[in-house]
Image (spheres, helix red, strand yellow):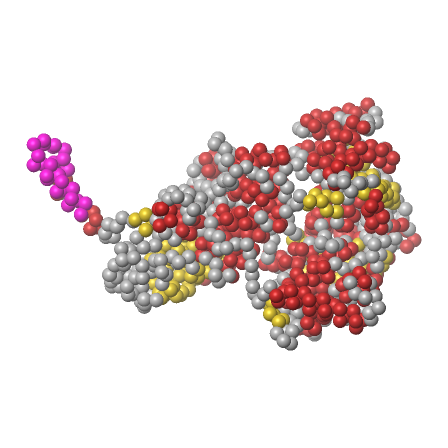
Amino acid sequence: TDTHCNAWNEITQVTWFDFLNHANTAAKFRSVFKEFPFFNYVQSKALDDVLYTGKNFVACAPTGSGKTVLFELAIIRLLMETPEPWRDVKAVYMAPIKALCSQCFESWKKKFGPLGLNCKELTGDTEIDDFFEIQDSHIILTTPEKWDSMTRKWKDNCLLQLVRLFLIDEVHVVKDATRGATLEVVVSRMKAVHAYRTAQNPETGLSMRFVAVSATIPNPSDIADWLSNESGPATYLDFDEGHRPVKLRKVVLGFPCSPNQTEFKFDLSLNYKMANIIQTYSDQKPALVFCSTRKGVQQAAAVLAKDARFILSIEHKQRLMKYASAILDSKLRDLVMLGVGYHHAGVDLSDRKSIEEAFTMGDLPVLFTTRTLAMGVNLPAHLVVIKSTMQYVSGSCEEYSEADLLQMIGRAGRPQFDTSATAVIMTKIQTKDKYMNLMNGAEIIESSLHSHLVEHLNAEIVLQTISDVNMALDWIRSTLLYIRALKNPTHYGFSANLDRYGIEAKLQELCLKNLNSLSSIGLIDMDEDINIKPTGREEIGLNDQKCLYVQIELISKSREFSDIQLRVNEKRPLNTLNRDKNRTTIRFPIEGKIKTSEMKVNCLIQAQLGTIPIQEFGLTQDTGRIFKNGMRISKCLSEFLSHRSKTGFSAVLNSLILAKCFRAKLWENSSYVSKQLEKIGGYTLSTAMVNAGLTTFSKIEQTHARELELILNRHPPFGNQIRESVIHLPTYEVTLEQLPRYSSATAEIVVKVNLKNQAQLLSRRTAPDHHYVSLIIGNSDNTVVFLQKLTDSVLLKCGSWSKKIDVAQASKGDEISVNLISSQYVGLDIQQKFNVYYSGARRYGTDNPYNKTYDPTGQRPQPLKPQSTDQDATQREHATSATDQGTNSGNKRQCNHFCKNKDLCGHDCCKVGVNVARKRSANPESSFFSYLKDLRTRLLFKCMCTTYIPKRLDMVIVLYV
């Protein structure tokens, strides 16, 4: 009964070669299992059910027993029953933790890649946010929250209906009070997809298979009932802890905590218990201690280093000194020499690598870390200690989720070194029994959907899964909530004496209560027959705010950033980024000092967009997390404002610009456009390009390849590659022409978008296939006249796109603003103005320059020449601020004061504008001759004066000639 690769219980095991003989096509899958010669007991018992049947399957097996292999067998089963090529086959792997998705992604990419399968990771850490980006993927790895957001419109996307296999890892998370409801709803939604597909195409016979695994399911039969299909409940196997490769001893220690004692003081008191626990349970083997905060990690390590000694020999001390010599952090260096280390995201990358190496080699006896290590780097230990079961989230304390605890406990046991391991949980004496039940897997899995029912009912109503109360009950029947309510009604607030029909009536009553809540706030409409439909009502904390800064401020307050903490040691560098006379600072300085997490998020967003170096590693980590969520939030904001009819033009325009800025990680008027090129990327090379004056794509394209290599200190053909990538970026042209059918109310404008370098893009494209531009046109009343998305693929087919639009006359002027905004690239946008002619008198000031008699025969509006596709800072600032003020109407223009709020400042001109001087004749020829005539008159007058100036006379002669 030793390691995974040894043939423990050989009598009951099936060799891989026996497996190959059972299937005619199995030889091609040999490489998937090349890491071990035998299946272990768990895998062998599940083999027939997973590989040789298509039934839904549930397995409960201890951590480390090779449950991932069951997923791989299910994927192979899918491939075996599907003829090649596997173009329209998709499998989805769903895990509660992003780290699990990443681990499987890296593993399956190597295993299934040679078979021609594409794997795609789809989590909050990836930039994929559209089904378009996973259309060529065969295996999709995701989290419940991400898949929930991706499947909210599944009926509109045929890709989702190609899913044939749905793999659920750590299915016990369904009972989690916070995240469990999402997992439950997503699985039930996929069951609805299967039912819909079967009803639409019954002759195909294609089914969706569900395979779920977990380490702790006391009631696996309920999960099997939940994952049932037309043929009945899922097959399930339940394995006890005896089948764990490394035997795990689980210990829960309760410590007294008085009601007056804060969580901080209780956590601090546990530091002084640590030396005794490690000496008792470590067996002089590596110990891993999880703490809730970075500061707590360093404090606990310092206390332990004083209380105990972990140097085993002189040779051991010499090895530690060797590791310490490579560490930059002086405090960490001193601790390592005593046999204690710490590891968290704020530690320098090189120091973390040194610590990981020392711990992996067994030279570092004790390592303190945060729970993020359990989600990422695989550092198993003989002893795992969880110091306190509370963590700080958004400034308040809450308990670790069960998924987090099991992930940390899963680090106990080193298969290559140990046959046994120990996991210790340190908690309050009041919660000791709770964690004993959790560790032993004795806590029955219950649904948490009833606590989040209103949110998910609303989503299903929008999806049209539910259109009346009876359908709501049908939907409830597909959930775990229904199954558990029948068996344990008191947990959900129902009487224990109710029969099946009574419980269904109570569930229907619960649905009706939540539906009434949705109806009361206007999110759904219900008629007398209780038919339901969504209202399309949308609310957001944005009162048509126009400028970029306000939108950034709004995004900074999103709940998605609630886990971003402002630490004391971060205030100085953040304040330097905000305001500093001697350094480059953020574009929109924040008033006062950085005091809150929202201000920190705002500052880091602007620093990243402004290409301002962030020196502190912890802030760099936070910035990465902010932008992963920020891209999604900014895109959501732009789409929301685009679909809301009452949104002003400036707000929509700036939301589109901001979404692009988050994607490119640059301001829209940035000079660092080269940073977006694959070969440039980082700060160093892009700064060299800026210093050389190469601040636009056109300038880069016009620069010789050898000169680029000199600027960037690179060898040929690097310069050619840079130029090629720029040449194959899309170059757009926008033209407008007014049709000669004039009216006092509306004008007919033909808008045309050309792809100027269509020929080059047919052979190669730098931009991704899904790149698109948004054409948005607004008038002087800040109203959106026209909005359209245009993909490069559409423009490539015919080279151009055109459309006739009707432009109603605005009350504040006849000028319209035309903008073509790239979805991804800074430096490709086009912004221009167009003057529209309307017949009849003007409705605004009589001094307006547009208020002249119009002669269609002599001054027919001409198409505007497009501006350069490169960014211009002045025009961008005009788009983001000046157009919002509305002071350019009539004979007024905006003043030049830089007041933050022009409505509240003391300048009258900020509110009413300043007078615009009349322009000279628009005819350049007549203006030139008027100037010559005036000059001749003045020169002749001077000739009659007593003072004679020969040089002036010479000029007169030249002018006459």
Q: Nearer the viewer, residue 939 or 331?
A: 331
State whether residue 529 appears in this view.
yes
Which quadrant of the figure has residue 941? top left
Q: Percent position (x, y) of residue 339?
A: 78, 29
Residue 171, located in which quarter of the rendered image?
bottom right
Q: Is residue 915 left or right of residue 817?
A: left
Please tell me whether residue 54 is drawn above or below residue 702 in the rendered image: below
Q: Is residue 353 above or below residue 537?
A: above
Report the span colored magenta.
930-956
The structure residue drawn at horizontal position 56% and vertical position 64%, both measured from the top left corner, is 537
Please tell me whether residue 690 belongs to the stretch shown in magenta. Answer: no
Magenta stretch containing residue 951, yes or no?
Answer: yes
- Farthest residue to the front: give it: 260
- The kind of secondary structure the magenta stretch mainly shows is helix
- Of 170 and 920, nearer the camera is 920
Query: Which residue shows up at 61% across the image and 35% down it?
Result: 570
Q: Position of residue 1 (x, y in %)?
A: 90, 46
Q: Position of residue 109 (x, y in %)?
A: 69, 50
Give above or below for 959 relative to 863: above
Q: Nearer the viewer, residue 589 or 911?
A: 911
Q: Position of residue 46 (x, y in %)?
A: 84, 58
Q: Quadrant location of the C terminus?
A: top left
- Asked which quadrant contains residue 682, the reply is top right
Please determine whether, in this image, residue 524 is positioned above or below residue 393.
Answer: below
